[in-house]
Amino acid sequence: MKNERENAVKNTTADKLFNFRPVFFTAIFLCLGVVFAYMGIAYDLSKLWLLVWIPLFVAIVFICRKRVGTIKVVLATTLLLVSFFVGFTGFSLKIDAFQTCNRYSTETTVVGKVVEKQEYAYTTKLVLSNVYIGENYENSKLVAYLPASFCENVQLSNEVLLQGFVQTDVSLFNEYGFRAYAIGDDIRFSLTNATACVVTGDTFDLFLDIRNRVEEVVYAGMDETSAAVTMALLAGDDTGIEQGLLENVRHGGIAHIFAVSGLHVGALFAFCLVLLHKTPLQRLKAVFKWLVLAILLFFYAGVCGFSASVLRAAIICLIAYTGRLLLVENDFLQSLGAAATILLIASPTALFEIGFQLSFSACLGLALLSRPITIVCNRFCVFVQKPFERFQPPKFDDDTSPPSILERIRRAVVSFLSVTIAAQIATAPICLQAFGYLSGWSLLLNCVFVPFVSAIFSILLLFVTVACILPTLFASIVLYLPSIVWSAALLVFETVDFSTFAITGVYLSGGASICYYGGFLFLTDKWNISRDYKHLLSMLCFIAFAATVVALNV
C-alpha cells in the first residue's frame, strides 16, 4: 500500500520542477510582500516597483509544472498575488497605526497594569498596559525604567502609579536596527527619571497571578541559581540568571533552552499526547481531544505572556495534530506555511524579529535538510561497518528478524544528529548576524542539553505544579530533586569557558545569506532535476557565498 502511494506521488510530480504547495507558497509570498513594504520604508522606494514582481508570480507557477492548465495558472497566480498584497498592505497599515498616537515629552503621572517585570542589577524594567498618561487613556503599552529600590513590592498584575518624564517613541529604527518587537507589541511610550512608584491596587489576571505564584514557589523551594534557571526554562524569563552564567550559555550556543519556544512546547505537546492516547482520556472523541490539547497549550502560552515564540510553536503543534485526527498525511512544509501565514497576518512585523527568524529557519532546515543529512550519515555508517562485516553472521534476503539493539541505537543517533545538524546549518547566518558570533561548541552542547531539557521539561513542570498547589512551606521538599539536578547540570557552565571556540568578526550581507541558503536548498530532494545539475547549482551558490564573504571581510 505504501509503495502504491509513493508511485502515485511520483507519477503526479514527474512533470514538475518542484511540488507546488499552495499554503507554503502563500506564506513565502506573504513574506515577500512584507519585505517589499519594509524596503519601501527603509530605502524610500517607489511603490511602482511593485510592477517588477508581477512576472515572478506567473513564472513561479509555470516552472512548477511543464504542462499547466490555464485555470490552474490563473488560480495559483491569483493566490500568490493576493498573498503578496496582503503582506504588503498589512505591514504598511501596522506601521501607520503604530505612528498614529498622542505625542508626549513632559513630566507627568502614569497609571497602568504591570504585565512584564525584568530585574537587573540597579534598575527594574516595567511594561504597563491599560495606560493612563495624565488624564488621557492610551490603547498601547508603556515601558518604564526605574531604580530597583522603587519596585521591591511590585508584582505582575499590580496597578501602579508612576511619576516621571514620559516620551512618545514611534521611531521605526534605532541603533540596533528595525524596532520590530516594539512595533509588534505596541510599545509606544517610555518613562524615565522616575521620582515615584506606588502600588495603587491589584487587578485580577489569571495568567499573571499564576506566574506570580510560580515565581514565589520556585524561589522559595530552590537555591537562587536553580530557581532563576527554572523560571527561564518554564516561562522564558532569564533576567534572574547571573550575567556571567547566561553569557557562557550563549557562547555555548544553547541560549534557546532559556527562551520558551518549540523545544519546550514540543515537549509539552508530547506529554499531552501521552495523556490523550495512553490514559482513560483516549476514550474522548477526536474533537474533544483537540479541544483539551488546545486549552492546555493556550493556558501555557498565557502563563508565558503569550510570547510570539510560544504561539508559533503551539500553532504548528495544533495544525499537525489536526491533520493526525483527520487522518490526513502530514506535510510539514504545509503546516509550517500555515503557521507562518496566521502569525504574519496577525503581526506582519514579526518577520523581522530574531525569534521568528530562528524558529522558522530551524523548522525549514528540519524539513529540507534532515533527510539528505540522514542519507550521508547512513552511508558513512555503512563505510565504517564494512571492514567488520566478515565477523558478522550472513544475512539472507528473506530475513525478517527485527533490527538488533545496536541497529536501533544507530538509527536513533543518526536521526537525532541529522535533525540537530540541519537546524544548526539553517540558523547559522541569522545567529552570526544577530549575535556577532557562532559557537564552536553549539553542535556538541545541543546534542547533550536538548535531549536533557526535552526529557525533564514536562517532569519539572509537573513538580512545579504540585508545589504551587501545596502550601509554600512544602516547596523546598517538592522541588529538592529538581534543584539538585540543575545544580549538577550547571557545573558544566561554571567550570568551562565556552567563549574560547567561536567564529567572530565575520560580516554577512543579504546576498551572501541568499547564496548560502541556495547552496543547501539545491542539495535537497525537493527539486525534480538531475543530480549533476543540482550539484552544479549548489557549487555555484557556495562559490558565490565564499566570494561575497571574502570581499566583505577583507
Image: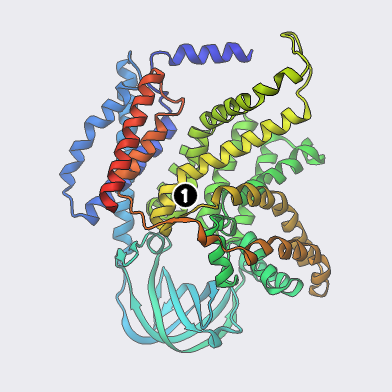
| Mark 1 surroundings within 10 Å by alpha-carbon count, few (fewer than 14), some (14 through 19), many (20 or more) | many
Residue 230, by quadrant, is bottom right
Q: What residue type is disc 1 on?
A: Leu
Residue at horizontal 35 percent and vertical 18 percent from the top: 65
Q: Give the x, y percent position of residue 321.
A: 62, 37
Q: Residue at x 67, y 31 (%)?
A: 411
Location of mark 1 (residue): 358
Q: Position of residue 332 (x, y in %)?
A: 53, 33
Task: Give the image location of residue 447, x and y in percent.
Answer: 62, 46
In this rendering, the answer to whether 332 lies above or below 301 is above
Q: Is residue 343 visible?
A: no
What percent of the width, then of the height, locates residue 293? 66, 45
Question: Is residue 461 something that shows in the picture?
Answer: yes
How many labels sit on residues? 1
Q: Nearer the viewer, residue 24 or 505?
A: 505
Q: Residue at (30%, 24%) from the top-left corner?
A: 74
The one nearer the camera, 209 or 32, is 32
Secondary structure under the numbered disc 1 in the rendered image: helix
Q: Considering depth in this image, is 250 or 268 the residue closer to the camera?
A: 250
Q: Quick check: 26 above or below 529?
A: below
* Residue sitting at the far bottom: 195
- Residue 510 placement, left or right of 308: left
User: In the image, is 106 to the left or to the right of 286?
Assistant: left
